[in-house]
Image: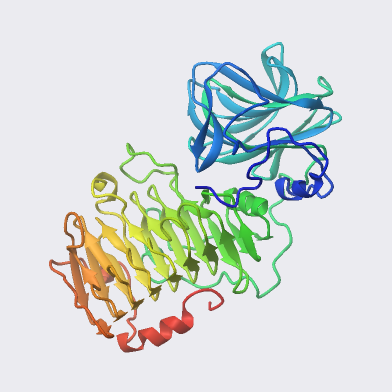
Amino acid sequence: MQTGKRAAGVSAVLTAVGAAVLALVLVPGAARAATVFGDDFEDGNADGWSRSGGSWAVVTDGSRAWRQSGTSSDARALAGAGWAGQAVQVRVKPTGFNGSNRHVAVTARVQNTSNYYYLALTNAGSVVLGKRVGGGFTGLASATAPVTVGQWQTVRLEAFGSTLRGFLNGVEVVSASDGTFGGGRVGVAAYFASATFDDVVVTDTPGQGVPPTTTTTTPPTPGTCNGSGQPVGFAAVNAWGQNGTTGGAGGPAVEVDTASEVLAAIAQPGPLTICVRGMIALPGPMHSVASDKTIVGIGANSGFTGGGLNIGLPIEDAITSPPANAVHNVIVRNLVFRNWADDGINVQMFSHHVWIDHNDLSSGFDGAIDIKRGSSYITVSWNHTHNHTKNMLLGHDDSNGAQDVGRLKVTYHHNWFNETPQRNPRVRFGEPVHVFNNYYFHNTDVGVACQADAGCLVEGNYFENVEEPVTNSYAGPSGRCVARNNVFTGTEPGQPDCSGSVEEARNYYGYTMDDPNGVKAAVTAGAGVGRI
């Protein structure tokens, strides 16, 4: 379920009376804007919309949303009373394109289904600002943009006077001047394409956004955004065309304190350090992070609630080897994650060189940190997980060997698994999976579960009151595990249930093992936020 949604239950038509305060949340930068229309479809219907072509239905996609499921027609939908100056914003997820030069779009100053302005995401990898006159399309401006089937993006089209501006994920990417249409209704469109639409908002004042050439906003205060340091383990290995994990190093820094700023920053191409100030409510469920990013919290009370981070391309079973455009070189540090609607941090589809370090994760829906579908060369270190059941998966299914065998190379070290019952981690296929110097406390189901022919090297950890600390016979096909030099203590200390041989982590990288007797003190003092 999607939580933290910007306007749950907003009716299909909002009057401006009493809505000015709501607009502060719905449209970034619109401090004095009035919301004149909005629909998040949480009422289960699309009353107030007229449709032409396509197959439309309100569905559940994390939350309720409006889906146009056909790809064989020129599908359009219109709403609203009609306004002169208007800023129309919608979240859209393309789900299919039928042919070339197809698009999904938000429309403004709509006269009828054949005459309007549009801001389109095309399957040619572009965002196009244009007008449709008599059914024919005329482009006015365009820019290259990632358009991925299955990925949510936020588009906004503004028409004030003769000035037209188009925004993608809060960033202004195109603009033009045209006087063909002076006013009209608003809408969405799917031109021989299928898509899901949600969170439609119309205001009577332009938003601020970020100019297209701008890469920074307010610089972080020196010393408060700590992105320094190097990972230990697989994230430091030279492999798959990437030598170590540096994140946004070499690029600018931006400080963010609103959801719209976060979503624009994590999707921006190129190296970027994103300094997160305060707890930010994200719409659920998860939001995709582009390559070459460092996302780091300021202080000990910064992070995300309601939504999580997705590091990876959309799921595609047919891809069984690392694609050239796999997401890579991402650092997530010093962040608090709470009440996420799906996963807190999800890494998938052959993403590589990811460092997840010094975070605090609790009270979410599904996995705290899940890594799957061929992702490799990842280090998970110094995190504190608590008050949560489904902690960390490595490999999501016993039948996914085509993507996972020979991959899922992950290091887990100095994490505090604090009364997290299971998945600490639960491992399939990966080898070697190196689990060292972690502190396990009262994990009532299992500590490390190694199955589906995974190879787990579990060493130098401190297990306290863990009845089944390490096993390769937890569920499903068995794996292999080697447990050595661990401490097992408490009122009911368990013992490892391991067999088989596992490749040594030292074949890939060097590391220094702490004395396991000192791990509890070191990890409880050093894991989590505010302790880099």
**Quick one: 74 or 285, which is closer to the camera?**
285
Q: Can residue 393 be seen in this view?
A: yes
**Quick one: 202 or 529, which is closer to the camera?**
202
**Quick one: 145 or 416, which is closer to the camera?**
416
Q: In the picture shown, does residue 94 fall above or below 315? A: above
**Quick one: 84 or 455, which is closer to the camera?**
84
Counting every numbered tag in the picture gives 0
Q: Which residue lies furthest to the top in this view?
A: 134
The reply, left or right, for residue 519 in relation to residue 162 is left
Residue at the image position 63 percent from the left and 28 percent from the top: 105
The reply, left or right, for residue 125 in relation to residue 406 is right
* Residue 24, x across and y down, in percent: 76, 50
Q: In the picture shown, does residue 46 fall above or below 222? A: above
* Residue 519, x across and y down, in percent: 36, 84
Q: Can residue 251 be seen in this view?
A: no
Residue at the image position 20 percent from the left and 55 percent from the top: 452
Q: In which quarter of the image is residue 156?
A: top right
Q: In the picture shown, does residue 422 fall above or below 53? A: below
The reply, left or right, for residue 513 in relation to residue 496 is right
Q: Which residue lies furthest to the right in this view?
A: 161
The reply, left or right, for residue 197 in relation to residue 366 is right
* Residue 161, x across and y down, in percent: 86, 30
Residue at the image position 49 percent from the left and 47 percent from the top: 1
